[in-house]
Amino acid sequence: MGWQDYHLWAFWQGKRRFEPADPEEGVKPAPSFDPAVLTIGDLLPLKGAKLRYNYDFGDDWWLDIKLLSVEDVQPKALYPRCLAGERAGPPEDCGGLPGFEELLAARKNPRSKQAKELLAWAGTDWDPEKFDMTLSNKTLAALPAPRRLH
């Protein structure tokens, strides 16, 4: 999505909620609910399995995730990795879906002062139609535990 991961977030599987520890609140989830311990295989064990992801409880982004297939491991490939994608994610802190819709409208009609301000805020390099798989994979490779599978 291109988000910076500085907002609260959680995964949901039915009514089960998986979220990181909150050091400010002194709350640590049980290991069976701790995303620092769980793998994607724990949460999406079978083809067709689904999760919901909630990011930034203020902007309140909800994404549905579904495991479509499991492919054979490719030797020398770094995991996790992105295999495909479409469009750019909404910019961080754009105001949730209503703010994102305003930003998209500003791109279609950039003449008003508000539209110009929104577009300047988003940056000239942000293109909602562009998906950069190379950048996505570089971001994934920079995660704390990228690994090669055998």
Image: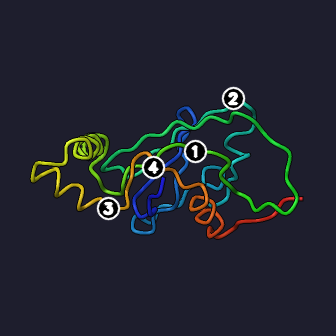
Mark 3 surroundings: few (<14), some (14-19) or many (≥20) residues within 10 A = few
Quarter of the image where the C terminus is located: bottom right
Is 103 displayed left or right of 3 in the figure?
A: left
Mark 2 surroundings: few (<14), some (14-19) or many (≥20) residues within 10 A = few
Give the residue type that dot 2 points to: Gly
The answer to the question of whether label 1 and label 4 lie on touching residues, with beta carbons closer than 8 A, is no
Of the two numbered discs 2 and 3 in the rendering, the one whose residue sits closer to the viewer: 3
Is 7 displayed left or right of 120 in the figure?
A: right
Of the two numbered discs 1 and 2 in the rendering, the one whose residue sits closer to the viewer: 1
Of the two numbered discs 4 and 3 in the rendering, the one whose residue sits closer to the viewer: 3
Q: Quadrant of residue 134?
A: bottom right
The answer to the question of whether label 4 and label 3 lie on touching residues, with beta carbons closer than 8 A, is no
Mark 1 surroundings: few (<14), some (14-19) or many (≥20) residues within 10 A = few
The residue shown at (70%, 57%) is: 80
Residue tagged 4: 88
Residue tagged 2: 48
Question: In the depicted view, which residue is nearer to us: 93 or 123?
Answer: 123
Question: In the depicted view, which residue is nearer to us: 92 or 105?
Answer: 105
Of callouts 2 and 4, the N-terminal one? 2
Of callouts 2 and 3, the N-terminal one? 2
